Image (cartoon, rainbow, N blue to C red):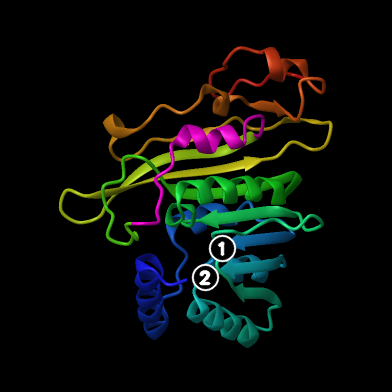
Amino acid sequence: MANRSTQFFDAQFARQIERADYALNPFERRALGFVGKRMLDLGCGLGNLALAAARRGAQVTALDACPLAIADLKRRAAAEGLAIDAEADDLADWRAQAQAQYDTVASIGLLMFFSCAQAQSVLRQLVLATEPGGVLILNVLIEGTTYRQMFDPQQHCLLDPHTVMGEIAGWNVHDLAVEDFPAGGSEFKRFLTVIARRPPRGGCLSLPATQFRQGSKPDRRPRLPSRASRGATCESARSCSACSAAPTRAPGSRPSC
C-alpha cells in the first residue's frame, strides 16, 4: 500500500541503486558483529546488512515493502552466489511464523512507519521470532524526533523508549544507545538502538554489562528503564533469584546465578 513513506524510500532507493551506493549505515555496522547462523532482516531496505550477513555464512530471510529494493537485492545476491530468501511484502501486519525462529532478528529503521498499534504489534512479533538465546537488533526513531519529512501524516509512530524496552524486559542488553542526528536546520532525528539477547529456556545469562552510548544532545536524552543496565537476566524468576530480586546495579557489575 503506497503512502508518503513508501514513495519517499522508493525514490531514495532508486537514487542509491543508480549510484551503486551500498555502504552499511552506522546502525548496520553496529549490528553485523552480532549476526549468527539464521537471520531475519525485517525492513531490509536495499539489503546491505542481509548481504553482509550472508557473506559471513548466515542463512538470511530479508523482507521489505519496496519491490525495487528487493529486486535489486536478489540481483546482487545472485551475482555473488549467495542464497538469500528475499521477498517484498507489506510489513504493517507481519506475523512471526510459529515454527520459524531465528538466532538473529534485525529490524533497523522500520517500526516508525506504522501506526502505533501496528508498531507495537510488529515489535511483539519480532520478540516471538527471536529464539531462546538469540539476539534482537532493533533501531527505531523515538519520541523527541522533530524531522518528519519521510512520514505519512496518517501512519507513523514515534515510540516511547520505555515501551520498547518493556517488550524485552529480562533480556541481556548488549548495546543500548539514544542518539540524535542533524536533519537540516534545527531539526533532528532521535534514534533508539538496542541489541539484546533473549535468555535461553530455563536458563540465566551472565554476560558483559550494557554498553550505553550517550546521544549527541545529552539534555534531550530520555531516561531509560533501569532494568536495561543489569548484567545478568533470566527468563523467569525461578531460574535465577538474583535477576528477579536484585536492586539496580551499576554498569559492569554482574550477579552470580
Residue 189, percent across and down? 31, 49
Report the disc number at residue 91. 1
Q: Amino acid at mark 1?
A: Leu
Task: In this rendered view, identify the residue nearer to me: 55 or 158.
Answer: 158
Q: Is residue 140 rendered to the left or right of residue 56?
A: left
Characterize the local packing of mark 1: few (<14), some (14-19) or many (20 or more) Cα atoms within 10 angstroms: some
Residue 27, compared with residue 59, is above or below; it is above
Q: Quadrant of residue 256?
A: top right
**SS for tag 2?**
loop
Residue 204, percent across and down? 77, 29
Main secondary structure found in the magenta portion = loop
N-term-proximal mark, 1 vs 2: 2
- Residue in the picture at 28% in, 37% down: 217
Q: Is residue 142 rendered to the left or right of residue 106?
A: left
Report the disc number at residue 65. 2
- Residue in the picture at 65% in, 56% down: 35
**SS for tag 1?**
loop
Q: Is residue 102 rendered to the left or right of residue 19?
A: right
Q: Are marks 1 and 2 in contact (CB under 8 Å)?
A: yes
